Image (cartoon, coloured by chain):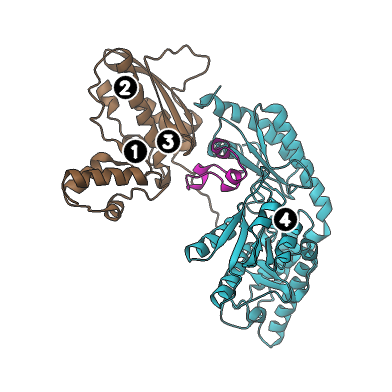
Amino acid sequence: MQSFMSQWVYTDTVKDHFMNPRNLWKEDEDFTPDGVGEVGSLACGDQMRVGIKVSDGRITDLRWLTYGCASAIASTSMMSEIAIGMTLDEAYHITPQMITDKLGGLPEHKFHCSVLGDKALRAAIDDYLEKHGLDNPYKGTTARIICECKGVTDHMIEDLVKNDKVKNFQELQDATGCCTACGKCREKILEELNECLHIYGKQ
Amino acid sequence: MDRYVYLDNNGTTRTADEVLEFMKDNSELYGNASSMHTLGRNAAAGIDWARGRVASLIGAEPEEIYFTSGATESNNTVFGIFRDRADDGDKRSRIVISSVEHPASIESAKYLRKKGYHVDLCPVDHYGRVIVSELEKLMGDDVALVSIMTGNNETGTIQPVAECASVAHRHGAYFHTDATQAIGKIPVNVDDLGADYLSLSAHKFYGPKGVGVLYARKGAPLLPYIHGGHQENGMRAGTYNNQAIYGLGKAAELAEAGLMEEHDRLWEMREALRKGIEERIPDVIINGSNDENLCLPGTLNVSFPGAEGESILLYLDLEGIEVSTGSACATGSLEPSYVLLASGLDVELAHGSVRFSFGRYNTMDDVRYVLEKLPPIISRIRAMSTRRG
């Protein structure tokens, strides 16, 4: 007899991190972070908090908490494994793509969940530098994600406008898929697009 | 995995053994029920029998029963009838539905709105129950149809259907109820409810998938909506799906025979689970009413603040327990349950909602198993959460 068996909802790596999360911030442990960052919106159902310990410009330890779905939990867990041991410079440039690749991929509509882990980490680094009166050489240098669902950044929009690839919202949407999932970024996308069109005299 | 516990009976049910057996017993009736020869006539006799069983279940006449592919088609059909009437110049062109209808109605209504028709949504109270005085305010002599479901799929909330129907009728509008979730759980009688139209699906009460019914009261407007042969008085063309219709007939017979007994059994399990959860897990919110007269017996919808629904669902799934959630993450829509939001629930609580829905194959052992596995899962998720205390 033919029998049908489906795969689990996510990859085996996601399942492993979901069932056995790494570097979780346990309630009873003595972890005093040097910097803490929290990002996320309850409207989307995901929120993350990351605490880091820093020594000689390196992340020596990290703890996290996540309110969210299985892929959000797994991607924060994976982010923690990637970040520990990195220099602040390396850690600041972790991308959502790096996290999802290591997880063996996520369904497209889940991509926005994994974006939060790296953002929470950057917020923690910002907090560390500020608390310790250090210059922040990173802030503003990294691309800012505007469409979280599709991972569309201000730099991507700027490049497309500058190189005459897109002239209006429709073309930008066709090129990047921005604003095709939850639609919450529409205003911000339009604002960024109009600014770029203005700056490069494309209007 | 110690055990397999299916608690998603509002999603769909296991086809009853008696139904499968009955379909198998009649598998030789493959004739086209529209044919004049013996095999065709025998097949048609089976279909007439099934029509009679469904009519008896809901207190209708057999000729008021139209077979469809399911309640989604039935709902779409009703909306389509009134769209066509508006197109043909009927002055009554407005449709009023509740804000917690099934997507088969909500999306049909949205589509009509997009096409320029006037559709109003009637608000509900914190149980998700239609506020009849608000419905009254929405009425006028331009309303063609009022559509209010019998019982809600997510919360189990039973609507004041008869009252809504009389409001509709007082203003000269027709009344439709989607009874999909209520059939086989509470008494559903088209005269008691005052329904001009009613939708149901076989697979929600142990019949096969892909078959359902549109009930249309004698004299209520009907227009052919699937064009082709002369099946169903020319209303809904297409060769009959004999076996599925026989299965629906058998399921209707079973539902009618054991109705109140099944009601009490489902309610007992639902209440045992609710009380067990409230005893064992701190800080939980029951969505919908705990009054037996206001809630479908097998449905329990619970929010767990600080825990997200998809995580709960998947940890339960790994223990062999199958439920559903109102969390956005599980649907891919990014918006949590519109039913819970319309009932005034906070967005975080909607993300943290889980629906347990019992059926005829569940037992008290299932309740005990869930009560053993669920509390540690909730405390584990809460301990991981940014929302922890």
Alpha carbon distance from label 2 to label 1: 25 Å
Residue type at tag 2:
Asp
Question: Which chain does the numbered disc 2 sit on?
Answer: A
Is label 3 in a helix, a strand or a loop? helix
Where is residue B272 drawn, in percent x and y? 76, 37
Same chain check for tags 2 and 3 = yes
Question: Which chain does the numbered disc 1 sit on?
Answer: A
- Colour chosen for chain B: cyan
The residue indicated by pointer 3 is A13
Instruction: Compare residues B19 and B117 and report the one nearer the observer.
Output: B117
Q: Nearer the viewer, mark 2 or mark 4?
A: 2
Alpha carbon distance from label 4 to label 1: 46 Å
Where is residue A49 drawn, in percent x and y? 43, 25
The residue indicated by pointer 4 is B182
Which numbered disc flags the more N-terminal residue, 2 or 1? 1
- Colour chosen for chain A: brown
The residue indicated by pointer 2 is A126
